[in-house]
């Protein structure tokens, strides 16, 4: 009975994580790029996103033999990708989507490349944790700053367009 309960909890958590990732890919990326897409296309993209994320999770699960390394990878991605925008969200009053995306892309991407080097998929000589964290945070901060500039330029351009239409 205990095994069934633990398996159900793991499956539920996995399902939630995959669906949340697919929702983010569909709503935050696809619908922003293709804002006039039909509902049928949105459902298709959502299903493809779910499949891609499930396959990615399967590949990671079969490559990682240690749950501690898997948790370490997850915490490194969160530390290097989410820390700067997470702290900034407490102080900024406006949404800054480009800043969040670029900081996650650079910081989290750096952590993923480090992971791929650690499991010897990529042949680079990459610093291992904890020595990789300062550079990952630096990339996250750089992405956040560049994204803030992009968001500001887009906002100013949009406000000028609104004034001209009024």
Image: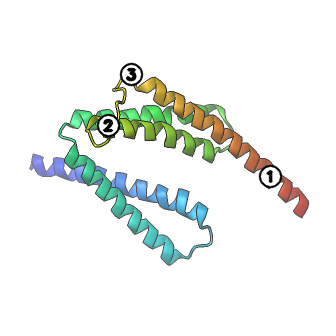
Please tell me the numbered disc located at residue 117: 2
For the question of whether residue 156 can be seen, the reply is yes
Q: Nearer the viewer, residue 125 or 147?
A: 125
Q: Is residue 165 above or below residue 37?
A: above
Q: Earlier in the sequence, mark 3 or mark 1?
A: 3
Task: Label 1: state its secondary structure.
Answer: helix
Task: Label 2: state its secondary structure.
Answer: helix
Which residue is at 38% across, 39% downward? 113
Where does residue 22 sit, x and y in percent of width and height?
A: 42, 59
In space, the residues marked 3 and 1 are separated at their CA atoms by: 41 Å
Q: Is residue 98 left or right of residue 110?
A: right
Which residue is at 50% across, 39% downward? 106
For the question of whether residue 84 can be seen, the reply is no
Please tell me the numbered disc located at residue 131: 3
Residue density around tag 2, few if under 14, some if 14–19, many if 20 or more, within 10 Å: some
Depth check, mark 3 against mark 1: the one in front is: 3
Q: Quadrant of residue 92?
A: top right
Which residue is at 44% across, 41% downward? 109
Depth check, mark 2 against mark 3: the one in front is: 2
């Amino acid at each position: 009975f205990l095994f069934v309960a633990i398996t159900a909890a793991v499956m539920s958590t996995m399902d939630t994580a995959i669906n949340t990732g697919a929702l983010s890919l569909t709503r935050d990326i696809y619908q922003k790029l293709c804002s006039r897409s039909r509902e049928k296309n949105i459902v298709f993209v959502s299903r493809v996103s779910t499949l891609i994320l499930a396959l990615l999770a399967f590949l990671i699960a079969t490559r990682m033999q240690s749950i501690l390394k898997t948790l370490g990878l997850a915490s490194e991605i969160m530390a290097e990708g989410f820390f700067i925008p997470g702290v900034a969200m407490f102080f900024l009053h406006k949404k800054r989507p480009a800043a969040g995306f670029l900081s996650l892309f650079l910081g989290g991407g750096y952590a993923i490349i480090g992971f791929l080097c650690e499991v010897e998929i990529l042949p680079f000589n990459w610093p291992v944790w904890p020595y990789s964290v300062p550079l990952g945070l630096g990339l996250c901060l750089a992405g956040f700053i560049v994204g803030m500039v992009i968001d500001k330029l887009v906002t100013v351009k949009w406000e000028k367009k609104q004034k001209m239409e009024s």
